[in-house]
Image (spheres, grey):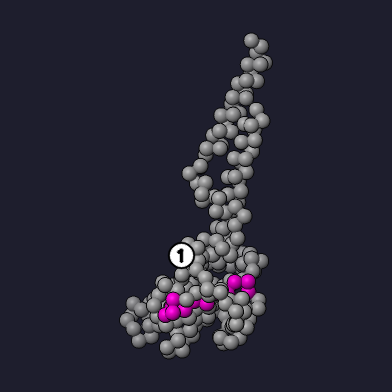
Amino acid sequence: MDIKLIKNKNLVALVICFCITIITANIDMKDFYMNYINADFYKSYELEQVLYEIATQSVYTVVGDNASEKMLDYKAEGRNMISNYTTANVFVINNDSKEVYYNNISDIDKYLKTVTTSYPNVYEINFKDKTMYLLNDKNNKVRVSTNHFGNLAQTKKEDVTTYIAIPFIINIEEMKEINHNEPLYVKYKEFIKNTDAANFFVGCKIIASTIIITY
């Protein structure tokens, strides 16, 4: 048999084996990667992590003044965590004591007017009523739940209302120039990393499959 033909057949076999290896590699991660194809950050697991952290900690920011030392520690921890979210605009109200906590705007009317006109996603979470809304404006809101964490209002039972405004992507990206440890920025970068990995995962398998079909 022609030596050149043998070499060509060996090369084809090698290429096909290599492509099969690429196609089968990390196939158990298929469902994970597929969740990030054409994904929307505002509907992502990473953003929901941010919402969950803020929502659960927000209650502590306006309760615990006359409680145990442990609760006071929770209060300090909750306020410290929310103050680190410099791009997410947060406002918390204890509906019993009327105590408020915020990381940006101190007046609730001014806050709602600002965030409902200049932020793409604004959430209102009432823990006593177990309600969670997405605000389109002050007078128009839609009841929602997150995909991974469900109704965030079920995480606590105190009579506290928390507002969380999530800014535009460009404002999140700008945090790299200010503070790359900004929690919302860190979660956004995780989301980008996962979407890039998903595109690479799918792209490699498409190319490998095309090569096999061609041969």
Quarter of the rendering containing residue 156? bottom left
Residue extending farthest bottom: 97
Judge whether residue 134 can be spotted in this image.
yes
Give the magenta part as a residue range.
119-130
Name the amino acid type tagged 1.
Phe
Give the percent coordinates (x, y) of residue 18. Answer: 57, 31
Would residue 121 be counted in the magenta stretch? yes
- Secondary structure, mark 1, is loop
Quarter of the rendering containing residue 135? bottom right
Give the percent coordinates (x, y) of residue 101. Answer: 49, 82
Give the percent coordinates (x, y) of residue 72. Answer: 37, 80
Would residue 61 be counted in the magenta stretch? no
**Could you tell me which residue is drawn at 56 percent across and 58 percent down?**
191
Q: Is residue 97 above or below residue 104?
A: below
Q: Please identify the quadrant where the C terminus is shown.
A: top right
Judge whether residue 177 can be spotted in this image.
no
Left or right placement of residue 58 versus residue 10 in this view: left
Give the percent coordinates (x, y) of residue 194. Answer: 56, 53
Q: Please identify the quadrant where the N terminus is shown.
A: top right
**Could you tell me which residue is drawn at 66 percent across and 66 percent down?**
170
Q: Which residue is mark 1?
A: 149
